[in-house]
Image: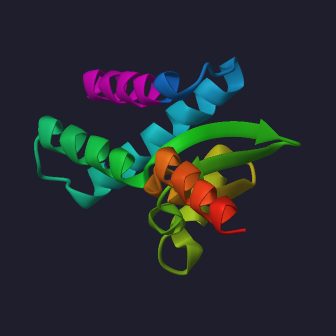
Amino acid sequence: MKKIWEKIIVTVLSWFDNKKQMEYEERNIAREIGIFILQENIKKYPDDSHEFVFAETCKAIRLLGITSVSIKKGEVVITLSRPGLLIGKRGLRIQALQETLKRKVVVKEELVTDCLIPYWYVDEFEDDVRAEL
């Protein structure tokens, strides 16, 4: 069982480390989030193999689309692309996470609309608008 915990921690930290350099306390919070999701999956799939539970946990973490974890004024701020998955039905999942972390958790949605319109298209559009004026 210890190997799965280590794999989850390494996997979670590798995703976060790719995004930005994290402080020590933020790394611990990221670890605890990974362990929280792993514990949920262990309860959800009690009879399945460790490899399956690990794969499901990695998939669940990827689906959240977490881009950053920071600590501001004693609160944990998690920025992700799919906040509804972390909040859960009636907010039960986020409440359980807050109890696990023993801190208030603030969820921020990362808006991906900036990525949907290529910059070159915006530049051409602005040039066309200027030409009409």
- Residue furthest to the right: 73
Q: Residue at x 27, y 21 (%)?
A: 3
Q: Is residue 56 left or right of residue 51?
A: right
Please say if 132 is above or below 39: below
As for residue 11 lying within the magenta part, the answer is yes
Please say if 40 is above or below 83: above
**How many callouts does the rendering have?**
0
**Which of the two residues, 92 or 63, is positioned nearer the viewer here?**
63
Quadrant of res 72: top right
Q: Residue at x 66, y 29 (%)?
A: 26
* Residue 5 makes an appearance in the image: yes
Across and down, in percent, residue 87 comes to: 54, 67
**Which of the two residues, 126 or 54, is positioned nearer the viewer here?**
126
Across and down, in percent, residue 48 comes to: 11, 49
Q: Residue at x 65, y 55 (%)?
A: 98
Q: Is residue 88 left or right of residue 22?
A: left
Q: Residue at x 55, y 34 (%)?
A: 30
Quadrant of res 114: bottom right
| Colour convention | rainbow
* Residue 109 makes an appearance in the image: no
The C terminus lies in which quarter of the figure? bottom right
Across and down, in percent, residue 34 comes to: 44, 39
The residues colored magenta run: 1-15
Q: Is residue 48 left or right of residue 109?
A: left
Q: Is residue 116 left or right of residue 87?
A: left
The main secondary structure of the magenta stretch is helix
As for residue 46 lying within the magenta part, the answer is no
Quadrant of res 94: bottom right
**Which of the two residues, 31 or 64, is positioned nearer the viewer here?**
64
The N terminus lies in which quarter of the figure? top left
